[in-house]
Image: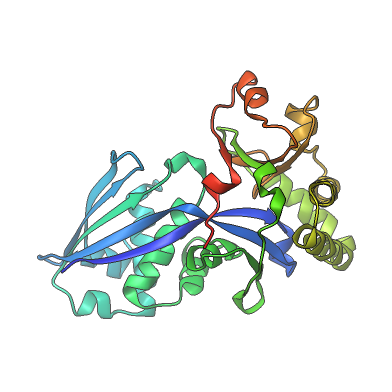
Amino acid sequence: MPATFYSNGKLFISGEYLVLDGADAFALPTKFGQNLVVEDGKDRIINWKSYDYNNTLWFENTISFDEIINNSKSEVETVKSTLINILHEAYVLNPEFIDQSKGYTITTNLTFPRNWGLGTSSTLINNIAQWTKINAFTLLKNSFGGSGYDIACAQNNTPIIYKIKNNEVETVPFSPDFTKNIYFVYLNKKQSSKAAIHAYNKHKDQNLAKSVAENNKITKAILNAKTLKEFAYAVEKHENHLSDILEIKTIKEIAFPDFNGTIKSLGAWGGDFVMVVSKEDPKEYFKSKGYDTILSYNEMILQE
């Protein structure tokens, strides 16, 4: 009988970059995610298929148990080599799923377009960790690296505050009346964060404790905002705070200076989704700028 595992996608609302140095990160699990279906196989191989949200097969390959055990690496990083590395690290943590099996047939299914950046990798890692009965945070650290907030979202169905120390997760209430004024707009581009991380690392050495304290103060204000005005003010303050640290302009300054409302980058600045806070429905504005993927808070965010 097939075993099915599921993990939520994620959106990073506050604490990006600074989370790596202990700052509070506020994140929201999404209604979108990924499942992993495991069936018994044979010949000490895994027949693997991955499907996009529209049931399009985007990856198919065969992986031998020996490749996983030996972590066979290709000269060029591929989807297969990345997958082998994750499975190898899972094997190191718990060899039983290989040693006590004849083989597997595995299928993964995304419920969001893969280019949206909601956690194709983190949901996969959390699903593999569930299947192989290991710690997902450890698997992430040993394979991809990163803060781990995305794993926390994968495992929780409510808003969270995440701290990198001990992978501490606190579920928090966040259901203000003004969620109807919050939207998420897909920018349709990936952003390399290397330059921003370099600027952040350069700045943090001088003012790290102060920057983390300021982030935590603003994050608390975002969570505790009672009105749309208070929320928008706190979000703008966070955006400006990170703009100073990263030494780059905000996404609103760069691309939407004439927008009547608040726009915040989410996660790595300049790519994937932005959060929009607006009194009026902003869909026509963003569509006029060429951005057609606009989701309301209710459409995007998981709510119990």
The residue closer to the viewer here, 56 or 78, is 56
Q: Give the residue at x 42% y 63%.
A: 125
Toward the top, the furthest residue is: 288
Q: Is residue 145 left or right of residue 225?
A: left
Q: Which quadrant, please, contains the N terminus?
A: bottom left
**Front-most of residues 46 and 291:** 291
Task: Check the image and name the residue furthest to the front.
Answer: 177
- Left or right? Give the position of 112 relative to 175: left
Labels in figure, total: 0
Q: Nearer the viewer, residue 198 or 165?
A: 165
Q: Residue 140 at x, y = what percent?
A: 49, 66
Residue sitting at the far left: 43
Res 205 quadrant in image:
bottom right
Check the image and report above or below for 190 versus 93.
above
Residue 106, image quadrant: bottom left
Percent coordinates x, y for residue 83 in the rendering:
35, 57
Q: Is residue 118 left or right of residue 164?
A: left
Measured as percent of width and height from the top left, residue 268 is found at 65, 47
Res 27 seen here: yes
Name the residue: 19% across, 80% down.
Answer: 100
Image position of 183 with respect to 141: above or below: above
Is the residue 274 above or below the residue 226 in the image?
A: above
Q: Residue at x 52, y 63 (%)?
A: 304
Q: Position of residue 254 (x, y in %)?
A: 76, 30
